[in-house]
Image (spheres, helix red, strand yellow):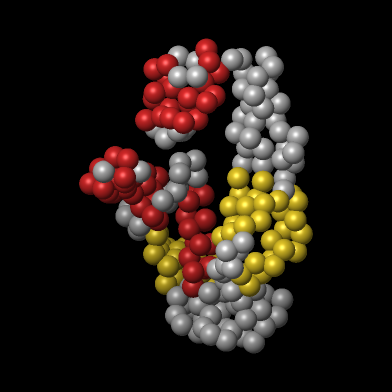
Amino acid sequence: MAVKYGVPTFKRTMVSFMEFGERTALAELGKLSKGTFELSEPQDDGRTYNVKVTITDDEFLVDLRDNPDQDDGPTNICRNGTIVCAQMVFKSLTDPDTPANDGSFRPLKVLTREGLVFHAQKRGAIGFYFETDQGFLTAGYTRSLVKPWSLEGRADGSGNFVEIDMADGETQRTAFVSGFDVTSDDVIRVITSCGACYGDPKNRAPEAMQMDIKNGYVTPERVAKVYGI
């Protein structure tokens, strides 16, 4: 998009989009009850988790500092995982219907401390949110070989598939796979099918096709081949 519309326009658009997210969040935050709300919840292992939430007109503060230290088991979570959970709660309470962006969460503040069960440090086991250098891929997609059918006897859809660019330069394409080993250096693309045609594409208005080209929906070469323009 930066190449298509220019870097200054792209940057202004991104700033505007983030500001829209922040304005929307603040508008909905203003409708919530104000004050400080606390909850303590006993756990099966005898510990107690505590949270304090303070809501003002311009801030949603989640304080998790008064909690147990991380343990040797897998009931810890990293700070990033904690923030994601807080973001989900905040978004559901403010404006769950609009798209989320970084601006949507500017009013949200999350307080933790290092070594906390909600801010585990290295070598603490994490059982809720984690990253790994190696894993495996399992996926299954229909409408890959038998593509979405068209109406009025025209072109079918493109089909669903998964494309894996391996770190060694090999590319694999599949629709059904289970336990396929991947690493953090591999690139996995999930390609979803376009819809099938309805009627003759050559009857599409030329000006509409030019707008599709301008908006990047289709290439001029594809237009010439499929639509005959």
Answer whether residue 53 is visible to the viewer in this image.
yes
Please give left or right for residue 137 compared with residue 124 in the image: right
**Residue toward you, 17 or 90:** 17
Please give left or right for residue 145 compared with residue 50 in the image: right
Residue 216 image point, x, y percent? 42, 35
Q: Quadrant of the N terminus?
A: top left
Instruction: Name the residue at 44% across, 48% down.
Output: 100
- Quarter of the figure with residue 132: bottom right
**Residue toward you, 206 or 119:** 206
**Residue toward you, 60 or 74:** 74
Instruction: Name the residue at 59% across, 84% down.
Output: 124
Answer whether residue 48 is visible to the viewer in this image.
no
- Quarter of the figure with residue 117: bottom right
Vertical relation: 55 (above or below) 73: above
Instruction: Name the residue at 53% across, 74% down.
Output: 78
Please give left or right for residue 51 compared with residue 48 in the image: left
Residue 21 image point, x, y percent? 37, 47
Residue 193 image point, x, y percent? 63, 37
**Residue toward you, 3 or 81:** 3
Residue 171 image point, x, y percent? 62, 57
Q: Quadrant of the C terminus?
A: top left
Of all residues, the one furthest to the left in this rendering is 8
Vertical relation: 27 (above or below) 35: above
